[in-house]
Amino acid sequence: MTVSFIDLAAEGVKGLRPYQPGKPITELEREYGIKNAVKLASNENPMGASPLAIEAAGNALKEVEFYPDGGGFELRAALSRWHDIDPVQITLGNGSNDVLDLIGRVFLTPDRESIYSAHAFVVYHLTTLACGATGRVAAAHDGSRGPAFGHDLEAMRALINDKTAVIYIANPNNPTGTWLKRDELEAFISAVPPRVVVVIDEAYIEYVDEPEFPDSAQWLKKYPNLVVCRTFSKAYGLAGLRVGYALSGPEVADLLNRVRQPFNVNAPAMAAACAALGDQEHIKRAVDENRRGMAVLAAAFAELGLNHIPSVGNFVSVDFGRPAGPIYEGLLREGVIVRPVANYGMPNHLRITVGSGEQNVRVVNALRKVLAGQTE
Ligand SMILES: *Cc1c(COP(=O)(O)O)cnc(C)c1O
């Protein structure tokens, strides 16, 4: 008898597709026989991490035979000071993806639903299905009442019912770079039934420079159903070490900690995160460099006659007005890796991470060459 393991899999898992990460540089170089490829596909910080963080991780490696501090005392203490919040309200994750997973495991079951927007970060969908729950997708703005491709909070609110357990909001959102203002977001949260957990994923908050952008952690006292997710993967440049965290009310934090693996964040990662948090000058430089790079890319897109979605993150999705697959392939042959977003319902767009000055020139030149080649 042959066993069909797919039949044996949990119901939600049957329909899952593995998360598709950006293509690694080594893979492109192997497949295409290219050297000096650049990767602008995963919203990584082109300046790297703070040297202090790298030094701290190195020092932690000297004691790598020991289990890490499972409670993450020092990092939580540092985050507690940084956010002016009680350490019991902080849950550490192996990246914020881990935190998103914990939220699902605590609150999502096969008879419950989650809500997220079209074009929202795909992990909300993946974690919902993995928990056997049903994901309800709200149409995004079409540009008439709010920024095109952005979360439409009214549409999201209309999907709330008795089964709704979790609502995911990415602010700003990846891959669109769109964002929600303080007033509209708070109005939404205050209208959500208090039994529904509202997750605000702020993976790119360090890059945002908008006076009307919310400081959502301030709302935690008022809304015990709120969970704010942050990460060290983006502006802090520690994607390879995997550290993220949730800020929430103490009750939700206690539940998240019940399903958290005992040593989910490793010791070099926690040491690096503490040091990185202490080097805000590095973040400031990264944010400044990102602002300059974004302006360079936006100007180049305009010159090439391409529309893009205005983004407050460290990435930008550009519209080719036709299926972007061949352009993605053309860029690969030029040694430039960007991110296709067809799986986000955006088949005509490619998402490009803002790189270093040199990398931005490289992607613009490659784009010019590929577009010229394809219109001949
Ligand atoms: C990159 C990203 C994350 C962070 O993932 P980590 O697991 O912390 O590396 C979370 N949310 C969004 C929207 C992202 O783009």
Image: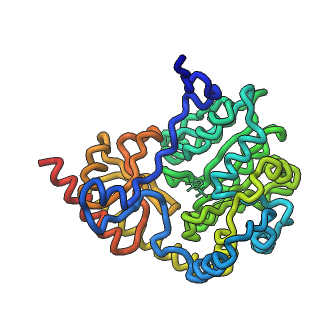
Query: In the rendered image of this protein, does residue 148 appear above or below residue 2?
Result: below
| 232 to the left or right of 31 | right
Give the residue displayed 79% in from the left and 61% down from the top. 90
User: 289 or 327: which is nearer to us?
Assistant: 327
Give the residue displayed 73% in from the left and 70% down from the top. 66
| 214 to the left or right of 251 | left
Query: In the rendered image of this protein, does residue 1 appear above or below residue 157?
Result: above
Query: In the rendered image of this protein, does residue 369 appear above or below residue 156?
Result: below
> How many callouts does the rendering have?
0
Q: Can residue 338 be seen from the camera position used here?
A: yes
Query: In the rendered image of this protein, does residue 302 appear above or below residue 109?
Result: below
Q: Position of residue 93 (x, y in %)?
A: 70, 57
Ligand 1 falls in which quarter? bottom right
| 193 to the left or right of 57 | right
The outermost residue toward the right is 251
Give the residue displayed 30% in from the left and 70% down from the top. 361
> Looking at the rendering, which quadrant does residue 217 occupy?
bottom right
The outermost residue toward the left is 376
Give the residue displayed 53% in from the left and 73% down from the top. 287
Q: Position of residue 20 (x, y in %)?
A: 47, 46
The outermost residue toward the top is 1
Q: Position of residue 232 (x, y in %)?
A: 62, 66
Q: Position of residue 139 (x, y in %)?
A: 55, 35
> Looking at the rendering, which quadrant does residue 276 occupy?
bottom right
Q: Can residue 276 be seen from the camera position used here?
A: no
